[in-house]
Image (cartoon, rainbow, N blue to C red):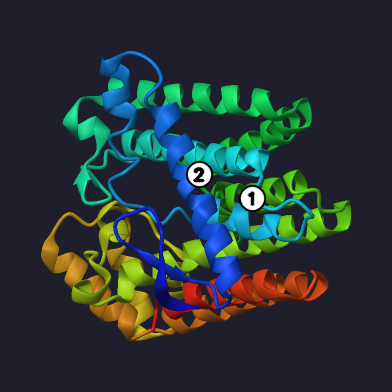
Amino acid sequence: MTNGTTPSPRNGFTLDLGDEALTKRVADGMVDVEALLRERLNYGEDFITEKVNHLAFAGGKRFRPVMALLCSEFGPNPGNENVVKGAVLTEMVHLATLYHDDVMDEADRRRGVESANARWNNSVAILAGDILLAQTSRLMSEIDTETVAYFANTFQTLVTGQMRETEGARGADEVEHYLKVVEEKTGVLIACAAHLGARHAGADERVVACCERMGAAVGVVFQIVDDIIDIFSDPDESGKTPGTDLREGVFTLPVLYALEEDTEAGQELRGLLTGPLTEDADVERALTLLRQTRGRERALETVREYLAAAERELDALPAGPANDALRALTQLTVHRVG
């Protein structure tokens, strides 16, 4: 997958899925997604729509809608109206979780702009997320009751993951706890996008199940890679400030693996990482020590395990341009770490 000549509707981004006809169908689908998203986000009073639009068009990859559109290619009716609605509802729920997460994390910035809680207050941010969930419910009701029931399970899993993260490992293995949280918080919504895309395009149950499992694995890959980038990226290339998670006291997979090491770096890290790091010097020291461990390499090994799981599902799906594009998209996610 490379940048090509077919424009997507957002920010001048160009998308090439390796097949001209597929690229055009997905690009056209994304135009429909963006139009419906704007329509639903601008429903209601002005003082509400101002808030719910705040993050929606401030960046973001639209990864979930693209996943839905690509998986719809495995059915006889790709990119139809219900596929587009499914794509939009996954993006709207994702946006809602960002508003709520920023309140819980007391975040100041999101997608390069002020977070809603920083610009207004926590109550406004929570209510903006709630409005998005209300609009999502309306969209689901326009599709069918099976979608409503499916998404109820998805949302329960997502909230369970958030609660699990909030409660902490409680004596359980920290790495297993982290992976379970990621599967529930990130993997489940990408799995949902894949499921809805395939099902509403008319794919058979076996294909829908393969798409869902593939999406779940890709979601975990996506999150672990983001966590690796937070620690080890060059800020000039990634646009991110290394160690943001450390400042918040969030210990992600590469950090957890580093803390397990019976080395001098591992020992010093265990003494240093007892909570959020508030001093720049401590963050820099932690980053230096992390680079002396195998935390990054072991996290990438875990990424490759989930990548292999995604590829097994792709092997079971029909061959063709959409399958090739999903493989390339998955590999591109991994290549972000260099």
Number of numbered callouts drawn: 2
Whether residue 97 is visible to the viewer of this picture, yes or no, is no
Which amino acid is tagged 2? Asp
x and y percentages locating residue 28 in the rendered image: 51, 54
Up/down of 43 relative to 248, above or below: above
Q: In this figure, which residue is indicated by the disc labeled 2?
A: 32
Q: Find numbered disc 2 in the image and state the secondary structure of the residue it sits on.
A: helix
Q: Residues within 10 Å of mark 2 (few under 14, many from 20)?
A: many
Cβ atoms under marks 2 and 1 closer than 8 Å: yes
Residue at (62, 70) in percent of width and height: 326
Residue 79's disc number: 1
Please give the name of the residue rendered at 29% of the width and 51% of the height, measured from the top-left corner: 248
**Sequence order check, earlier mark of 2 and 1:** 2
Residue 3 vs 13, above or below: the answer is below
Q: Amino acid at mark 1?
A: Gly
Q: What is the distance, in whole Å, between disc 2 and disc 1 at their CAs?
A: 9 Å
User: Would residue 17 appear left or right of 114 to someone viewing this image?
Assistant: right
Q: Is residue 144 above or below residue 186?
A: above
Residue 85 seen in this snapshot: yes
Towards the viewer: 108 or 70: 70
Above or below residue 207? Residue 32 is above
As helix, strand or loop, the secondary structure at mark 1 comes to: loop
Q: Quadrant of the C terminus?
A: bottom left
At a point 30% along the width and 61% down the height, the residue shown is 12
Residue 307, percent across and down?
Answer: 63, 75
Left or right, 112 with reference to 329: left
Nearest to the observer: residue 123 or residue 41: 41
